[in-house]
Image: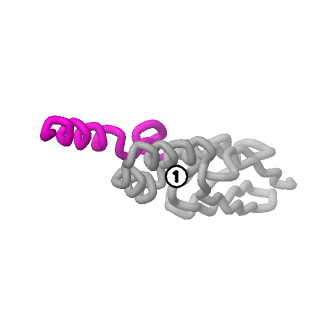
Amino acid sequence: MRTTFLSTAIFAVFVSGCATVSKGTKDALEVRSNPQEAQVQLSNGQSCTSTPCVFSVPRKDPVVVTISKKGCKTRQVNVISKMSTSGGAAVAGNVLVGGVIGLGVDAATGAAKELAPNPVEVDLSC
């Protein structure tokens, strides 16, 4: 009986946070502009001097993307954090296996989410 309990506990720890393990807590946010070579500033402090750019952004954090180029109209895009289709499957896996800890881990880390829109594509109207 004790061995069964111990085996179950160890198994629960290994499957905790299915989305955290399978997808990670960050997403690659791609920013493209027309014309290219625009500057990009994220509300979290990250920046890039020439589009196209790719940023590593926590899945749980919404971010405002500002794209600008001299002589062109500056654009802002709100990127939101939403439940991803594969993240929902990971949450369901946590529920089926009884991974209450995993549900908490995935919710706290945002691993079951994705950023949208991704990629961010803008026309700067130059």
Q: Label 1: which residue?
A: 59
Q: Nearer the viewer, residue 43 or 83?
A: 83
In the displayed structure, does residue 45 sit left or right of residue 84?
left
Residue 90, placed above or below residue 70: above
Any part of residue 121 in sight? yes
Q: Is 6 one of the magenta-colored residues?
A: yes
Image quarter (top left, top right, bottom left or bottom right) of the N terminus: top left
Colour scheme in use: one colour
Where disc 1 sits, the SS reads loop
Binning the other alpha carbons within 10 Å of mark 1 as few (below 14), some (14 to 19) or many (20 upward) gives many
Residue 67 figure quarter: bottom right
Q: Is residue 39 magenta?
A: no
Q: Which residues are magenta?
A: 1-26
Please report the residue visible at 63 percent of the width from the left and 60 percent of the height from the top.
Answer: 80
Q: Quadrant of residue 72?
A: bottom right
- Residue 2 in percent (x, y) is at 13, 40
Q: Nearer the viewer, residue 114 or 91?
A: 91
The residue closer to the viewer here, 63 or 24, is: 24
Q: Residue at x 80, y 57 (%)?
A: 71
Q: Please tell me whether the stretch drawn in magenta is mainly helix, strand or loop.
A: helix
Which residue sits at x=63%, y=43%? 30
Position in image of residue 39 (x %, y %):
65, 52
